Amino acid sequence: MVASAPVDPTARADLRRIAVIPGDGIGPEVIAVAVRVLETVTQISGRRLEFETFDWSADRYLRDGTTLPADAPARLAREFDAILFGALGDPRVPDNRHAADILLGLRFRLDLYVNLRPCQLLDARLTPLRERGEQDLRFVIVRENTEGPYVGLGGVFRPAMPEELGLEVDISTARGVERILRFGFEYARRHGLNRLCMTDKSNAMPHAHGLWQRVFQRLRSEYSDIEARHLYVDTLAAELIRDPRQFQVIVAPNLLGDILSDLGAQLVGGLGLAPSANLHPGRIGLYEPVHGSAPPLAGRNIANPMGAVLSSALMIEDFGWQPEARAIRAVVQAAIRAGQTTPDLGGSSGTRQVGDWLCNELLRQGLPED
């Protein structure tokens, strides 16, 4: 019997395994850049990442009917530390069956109840708001990710008839509301923030969102160090335009958070720059840009990879790799300021060329000092 070599516990602690799901449209192109950037930053730091790619996509679905294999969530949770996700959606699948099964399937079956959407302005030229700078737009939206109308309860009755009825049911549970609000408060504390705003539409939805009000009022007393307030969602949307600087952490129900997070993305430069994380603290997370699959842009080397790259920074930050995450954000900001971007941000570079620039700049700059 041959004795095995001793395992270096430090080296093992630095290894993370990433499941990569590139998906459809521009997904494979932007995820390829994100993976290259991750490989470059770990080359600098000496940490280790292992990637395994899963071909769950419209191509696969049309070829053999595969959407999300039954054992996939359990396997991903057991064997991987995170999921790096591209985008799903293809006109060849009109009902987007594969997209719903895969993305929503992972969110629900892994119970990823937090959708985290940071909104940070990296260059004042990118915001449509007049006379607003980088310090004015730094907030995060904490969106509930597994309840609300997205649970799929409802139906259509008497379809294609004059009396057709469409029904969607909004589900809010005390457990679901409490855990997302508590996450928001804890996030604020962990990041040294002292302002949290909860939003709902309880004046028009007194049952589901009345529950949000009651849980919020109970929890805010536990977090007296956080300045907590409530705004109806229409007021909040208006205030984000009028004075975004007042916001640090916003907690919202699923549907409202979905809308507000896209508004926030537009305020800081558009969906091409928007990262996101789908989380359940202590479990595997799913990290994805939110721009969608954009089929008309696929294969043309013009897709903006920054949202995917920034999502990868969120991922490694959750590993505790803060210097590497800061380095990635710094080179993204440097690329924007230097005009090394795709056409949607005013540059003339292609997707792959932006990736080249980011990797070269990472090698030049190295990691920031603590």
Image: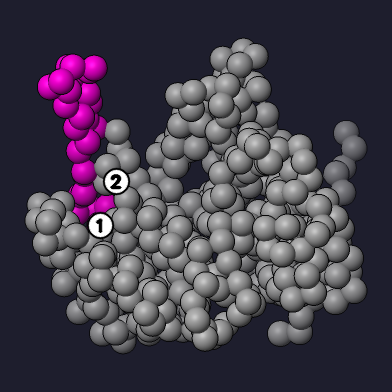
In this rendering, the answer to whether 54 lies above or below 256 is above
Q: Secondary structure at mark 2?
A: loop
Whichever of callouts 1 and 2 sits on the residue coming sooner in the sequence is 2
* Viewer-nearest residue: 144 or 279: 144
Which residue does the image show at 87% across and 42% down from the upper left?
3
* Viewer-nearest residue: 127 or 65: 127
Q: Which residues are magenta?
A: 153-177
Q: Report the residue that reaches farthest toward the top.
A: 64
Which residue does the image show at 51% across and 64% down from the upper left?
266
Tell me the quarter of the image containing the C terminus.
bottom right
Which residue does the image show at 43% across and 83% down from the upper left?
245
Q: What kind of residue is marked 2?
A: Glu
* Viewer-nearest residue: 1 or 157: 157
Give the image location of residue 136, x and y in percent: 49, 84
Does 329 sit left or right of 43 as displayed?
left
Give the image location of residue 84, x and y in percent: 63, 47
Give the image location of residue 139, x and y in percent: 46, 74
Question: Within the image, what quadrant is residue 261 found in?
Answer: bottom left
Q: What kind of residue is marked 1?
A: Val
Q: Secondary structure at mark 1?
A: helix
- Residue 173 part of the magenta segment: yes
Does 123 sit left or right of 12 as displayed?
left
What label does residue 147 carry, if any? Answer: 2
Does 39 sit left or right of 134 as displayed?
right
Give the image location of residue 206, x and y in percent: 9, 56
What label does residue 177 carry, if any? Answer: 1
Tell me the quarter of the image containing the N terminus.
top right
Which residue does the image show at 16% across and 71% down from the upper left?
218
For disc 1, the neighbor class at 10 Å (few under 14, some 14 to 19, many from 20) is many
Viewer can see residue 13:
no
| Rendering colour mode | one colour
